[in-house]
Amino acid sequence: MSLAEPTPLAASSGPRLRARRAWLRLLGHRSFLAGIIVLALLAVIVVAGPSLAPADPLAINPINRLAPPGREYLMGTDHLGRDLLSRLLYGARYSVAVGLSAIAGGALIGWLVGAFSGYATGRAGIVLAGLIDTFLAFPMELIALAMVSIVGAGLHNVVAAISLAMWPRIARMARGEVLRVRELEYVEAARALGATTRRVIGRHILPNVLAPMIVALTFYVGSAILVEAALSFLGLGVPPPTPTWGNIANDGRKSLVTSPWAMMFSGAAVGLTVLSLNLVGDGLRDYFDPRLRVQR
């Protein structure tokens, strides 16, 4: 074997070494590190929440209604005497599941429509671009609210409504990235060599727009959780007594002046989750954009 030839071990360790360096560089970003720690804790709560809950989140105890935080109830109770800590732990599973599911659906639709409208030329691209702009003319909260008002409240309906509200934002970004990448020389070379549209998009365009899409999706997950909380707060989200963070805040609104803890902890949970997602997205954006990394 020639000394110039890399050994199989060296060849296999190259990607691992690059991945390790990338991960260490991300962990060196303070915002990313703070956000990922909170999200890791949230993941533990989502997975092990039922095991960590000290009581049944649906158990009603009128004797202890609106009990303040203390030794028996660490976060107090709501207007029906239900343990708020247990409801928050269970609610994390529902709120996060709705946010992730809605973004998954919105990303799928948005990527397909945005990528095709950005790559296609002629009437098809113009029509799809007009469709995206039409949906973008309405606030996403209004779209979600209108759809839930039509089809009714419910877990699956809320996920569908938020997906419908989110996909135009994702499609706009996907279209812009595809418009940028499709004019690059290697894409034009692939087309000149006879590559099909599916191959050009899947092999040459998608990998090069994936990084900014991932960064954007971290922010959109937080937006989806906020929209779900807003719908539940208005009584149009996941129906009670299912303990989502929005439902808990809606229940606490009735006694906000006399018992602020009934609403305070659920609002803090939503705010902390959204902030953590934004911090992670900020770190990923700085990592993928060398210009921002140099500025820092």
Image (tube, rainbow, N blue to C red):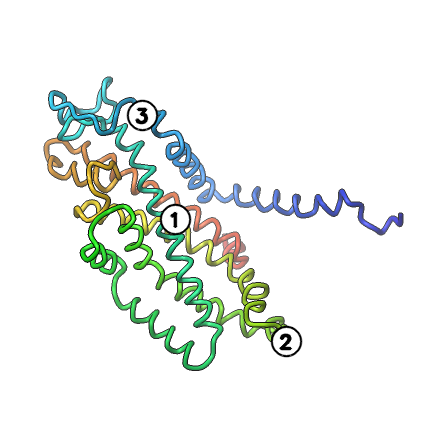
Separation of marks 3 and 1 at Cα, in angstroms: 28 Å
Q: Nearer the viewer, mark 2 or mark 3?
A: 2
What's the amino acid at mark 2? Gly
- Left or right relative to 74: residue 212: right
Kindly give the residue lying farthest to the right in the view shown: 1
| Residue 150 spot, x, y in % from top left | 19, 58
- Counting residues from the start of the chain, the first of labels 1 and 2 encountered is 2
Q: Which mark is residue 224?
A: none
Q: Which mark is residue 53?
A: 3
Comparing 106 with 286, the one in front is 106
| Residue 80 spot, x, y in % from top left | 14, 29
Q: Residue at left 44%, top 62%?
A: 111
Callout 3 crowding tier (Cα within 10 Å): few <14, some 14–19, many ≥20: some
Q: Nearer the viewer, mark 3 or mark 1?
A: 3
What's the amino acid at mark 3? Ala
**Callout 1: SS:** helix
* Residue topped by disc 1: 278
Q: Nearer the viewer, mark 1 or mark 2?
A: 2
Callout 1 crowding tier (Cα within 10 Å): few <14, some 14–19, many ≥20: many
Please tell me how many numbered marks the rendered image carries.
Answer: 3
| Residue 156 spot, x, y in % from top left | 29, 48
Comparing 13 with 135, the one in front is 135
* Residue topped by disc 2: 194
- Counting residues from the start of the chain, the first of labels 3 and 1 encountered is 3
Q: Residue at left 39%, top 29%?
A: 48
| Residue 39 spot, x, y in % from top left | 41, 39
What's the amino acid at mark 1? Asn
Q: Quadrant of residue 13?
A: top right
**Callout 2: SS:** loop
